[in-house]
Structure formats: C-alpha cells, structure tokens
Image (cartoon, rainbow, N blue to C red):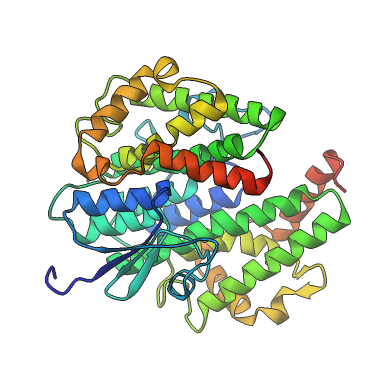
Amino acid sequence: MAEADQLLLLDLLPSPFAARVRIALAEKGLNYESREEDLSNKSPLLLKMNPVHKQIPVLIHNGRPICESMVIVQYIDQVWNHKSPLLPSDPYRRAHARFWADYIDKKIYPIGRMLWASKGEVKEASKKDLIECFKILEGELGDKPYFGGESFGYIDLALIPFYSFFYTFETLGNFSVVVEFPKLMDWAQRCLLKESVSKSLCDQRNVYEAVLEIRKKLGAE
Amino acid sequence: MAEEVVLLDLWVSPYAARVKIALAEKGIEYESKEEDLSNKSSLLLEMNPVYKKVPVLIHKGKPISESRIIVQYIDELWNHKSPLLPSDPYARAHARFWADFVDQKIQGTMYRLFEAASSESREAAEKELIEDFKVMEGELGKKPYFGGETFGFVDIAFIPSYRYYYGHETLGNFNLVEELPKLAAWVKRCLQRESVSKSLHDPNKVYEFISELRKKRGLE
C-alpha cells in the first residue's frame, strides 16, 4: 500500500479546514503534494474533484477525491490505521468525539466569520456568541490535557487550527483569549508542541492579513 | 433490554426518524419518549445541554446527540447485522460526504423555505431546493440505493425529509414525481422496507403540522 500511494491535497494555507487535513497527514507520517488554490480563480482540478461544493480542502488519493475536512480526517484515520489513531476505538467515545467536532464546525467558523466580516451590532452579537462557544469548549475540556483525554485526537485536531484565528478574533473583537480562557490557551500551547500541529498551522498574522483583505472586499473596513 | 435504549423523540422530526429507521434496521428494542419542544423535559435538558434538541439516544444512561452521529453509533455498536455504512474507507467517506450534503445544503434550504415570509423568498427557496433535489437525483443515478445495492447511511439521512416533501408531490410548479423519476422510484423502494414505513408518518399529517406552525408564526 505505502509504495504506490499518491496523495495530493488541494490546499489553502490560512484555511482551518485544510489545516486539519495537514495535521492528520502529518500525524500519520504521510508524504503528500500540496497544491495551493486561489479561491477567486479555482483550478479546473478543484472544480472537477469537488463539483458539489467547489471548496478546499480536497484530498486526492490515487486519483480519487475525498471532500469535507472531517470526512477526510476519518478517511485518513481508517486507511492509515497503523499509527496515531485520531478517533478512539470505543463507539461511545467516537460518538462523543464526532459530536464535539461537529459543534466546532457548526459554531466556531460561522460565528467567527460573522465577527470578522461585519460591523456594529452584528459584530457585537457575534462576539458574544463566540465567547459563549469558547466557554462551552473550555467546560468540555475541563482539566484534561486534551479534549480526548490523555492524548491528542479528533476533537483537538478539529479545533486547534482556529488558534491561527485567535489574533484576528482578539483584535477585531477586542478581547483576550489568554485572559478569558486560560485553560484553552494552555491546551493550544500543548498542542503546538506537536510538530504535526506547529508545522501545519498558518501564522496568526498571516490569517489576520487574509481576513483584512476579505473585510476590504466586503466593505467592512 | 428495552430499558437500556431510550429515544427522546418527536413525531414530525425527520432527524428522529433517521434514528428510528436505524434502530429498526438493527432490530433494537427501545423506549420512545415524545418531547414537547415548547416544554422540554428535564431529561432532555440534562441529556442534551448543548443544543436542547431531539433526537437524543440514551443508551445505558449515556446520551448521544445529533442524528447522523447517533446512526453511526448504532451502526458501530450493533455491528452484528444490517451494516448501514460500507466497510471500504472510500465508500464510507462517500457516504459521509452525501449525508453531510443532505444536512449542510438540503436541510438548510428546507429551513429557509419554512421561514420564508414573502412570496419572493418562498420562490427563491423552492428554486434552490429543486436544484438540490436534482443533485440527489444525479447522485442516485441508476443505483437502487444511494450506497449501491444495499440500503444505508445516505438513504437513511435523506428518506425522511424527502418523503415528507414528496408526500405532497409538488414544489411550486415543479412536479417531483414526474421530474425526478429516479428519486420517485427510490422512495417507493425505501417505503417497502418495514424499518422505513414504520418510522415515517403520513406526509399529509406532517404537512398540516408544518402549515399550522407557519400560521402561528404569521408566515402564512
């Protein structure tokens, strides 16, 4: 299996969804080609490989596409099950992991985006909602080193790419993550000690620059 | 055995129907507790504090929420019969992608249709929903089920909502039965399964309920 495997990731550096896949591939020690997409000028390959959503990330494994970040992560976990399991083996714990990854999907990106893409009341309401979400996540983390317990796993992988957005949230939302959510910050720093994470995440400043560009286009600046 | 599995339920919910279909496919006995969402039980609030929604499956006292997650749990735990997801990783990813599409795209459009207060927004949502259904018709293709030869995850995800729309056959001027014949045949095929027919309600009753709800909100 290992010899012939061809892995191509249709990628985007600041995307937290693409970062999840980069982390998963790194956790499994897999070699792959990363192709950076320009979402204002999508490649024919992207349009062919993800005709439904036309979005990144797309993992192309031996010519076959897999789309949707957590679907890709589960695929990687199942195919390369020889090391670093990302999902637990127990069905209840798996359901728990999926629930929290789904919560992160439903909440963090959409609310975060609302915060950095808007102004005035909408922005303030989004900030409140985002802070509420971080509170809930911190509650779920509790005193555990990772969301999954003793080791880095599925939920951690789903959330940690949003660390790259902390500077953006703090600057545009006018709050401090380390002050309001010290446990979450500790957790993030713990995750960053892992090479698979630190090498996969986009720099916080680069994300901020990318967000400012989008804000300009949306007229929010 | 039945006391071990409890479903916090709602008769009109297509999400709850998914769980009922999955439990029936596996032959699992369970107790259904009908919730009143205007007066949520303390059990629901305790078991799903994050969303306070149904369905919630409570197995040996431990809750699982979110219908697609519950169905996967049922499939992984009771793996002795009727696999709902394929074992091949690529086929599993394909199934997960399409079940996600039903929720991410189709349910979103249906929700906008439900909330539509003006005829413009109603027409726009109907148009979009028709396009979404066309995508599903294309994805089904010549296969008997979305997963291929056997009834599975994507069928379970889509049949409740589609059945309730298909029940009144038209979306605006678009005739679902005539224009989407593959999906029409698929509905009939699914309804032949006892797990499906026993888990779904009369679509006219569901439609009446939804209309009433819209009226109460001043949307009709």
Front residue of A194/B168: it is A194
Residue sticking out furthest to the bottom: B142
Q: x, y percentage for residue A213? A: 56, 46
Foreground residue among A64 and A10: A10
Horizontally, is B33 left or right of A87 in the view? right
Please give left or right for residue B170 compared with residue A21 in the image: right
Give left or right: position of B115 versus A147.
Answer: right
Q: B173 or A207: which is nearer to us?
A: A207
The image quadrant where one finds the N terminus of chain A is bottom left
Q: Is residue B89 above or below residue A135?
A: below
Residue B90, horizontal then vertical, whole percent:
32, 68
Which quarter shows the C terminus of chain A?
A: top right
What residue is drawn where x is 26% and y is 42%? A197
Q: Does any portion of residue B5 appear in the rendered image?
A: no
- Up the image or down, B73 lies above or below A182; here it is below
At x 49%, y 26%, the residue is A170
Q: Quadrant of residue B150?
A: bottom left
Residue B104 visible in the current orientation: yes
